[in-house]
Structures are given as C-alpha cells and as structure tokens.
Image: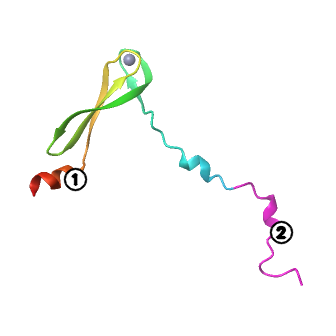
Amino acid sequence: MKKGPFDFAGMGDEPPARQEDSFEEFEATELYCPKCGMAVPVRKSLLLILPDGDKYEYRCQHCGGTVGDKIDKNGQFYDLLKT
Ligand SMILES: [Zn+2]
C-alpha cells in the first residue's frame, strides 16, 4: 500500500536545493581601477540627481579615485516633479 505515484523515497538522495546561492546579492561591486591596475571593490555614491535619473559614482576603496559612474533611471522622483 506504500508504493504509488507519490512515492518520494528516491528523492532522499538528491542534494538540498541550492537556492541559497542565488539569494546572495553582490553589494560590493568590483570595477577596474586604472590607478591601482586591478579590479577593486568600489563604493557607490550618489553624485547628483538628473532629470534622466540619479547619477551615481563608483569610487575605488583603495585610492579613492573615480572608476566609473552610472545613471539609475528612477521614475519616482521624476513623476513627483512632473505633477
Ligand atoms: Zn584605485
């Protein structure tokens, strides 16, 4: 009476789901710093707020030099300003 289509006995051999890996978020971005000559952990800081979005700057945590920037398109502020 124990055997049937819903017999999960074989599943005990399966390793536990590896979902935990995908939950990791990479808060610390690494970018190439020309001054340090290698990929370095960077700090993201808000530089200014543009109509297009918020401009962020990435700074090297070793030498403090700017290694990149990006504009985060964030519609929320924009909507507030428009209305
Ligand atoms: Zn650097």
Write the residue at 82% across / 66% down. Answer: 10
Q: Position of residue 49 (x, y in %)?
A: 18, 39
Of the 4 image quadrants, the one containing the N terminus is: bottom right
Question: Please, which residue is most extreme toward the bottom here?
Answer: 1
Q: Earlier in the sequence, mark 2 or mark 1?
A: 2
Is the stretch drawn in magenta largely helix, strand or loop?
Answer: loop
Given the image, on which type of amino acid does mark 2 rest?
Answer: Ala
Residue at (88% x, 80% y) in the render: 2
Nearer-the-camera pick, 68 or 28:
28
Above or below residue 10? Residue 45 is above
Residue 9: give its label: 2
Q: Which residue corresponds to mark 1? A: 75
Secondary element at image label 2: helix
In the figure, residue 32 lies in which quadrant?
Answer: top left
Label 1 beta carbon less than 8 Å to ligand 1? no
The span shown in magenta is: 1-16
Can you tell which quarter of the image residue 52 is in?
top left
Q: Is residue 46 left or right of residue 60?
A: left
Is ligand 1 less than 8 Å from the beta carbon at label 2?
A: no
Q: Looking at the picture, does residue 9 appear above or below residue 77? A: below
Q: Residues within 10 Å of mark 2 (few under 14, many from 20)?
A: few
Q: Residue 31, image x and y in percent? A: 40, 28
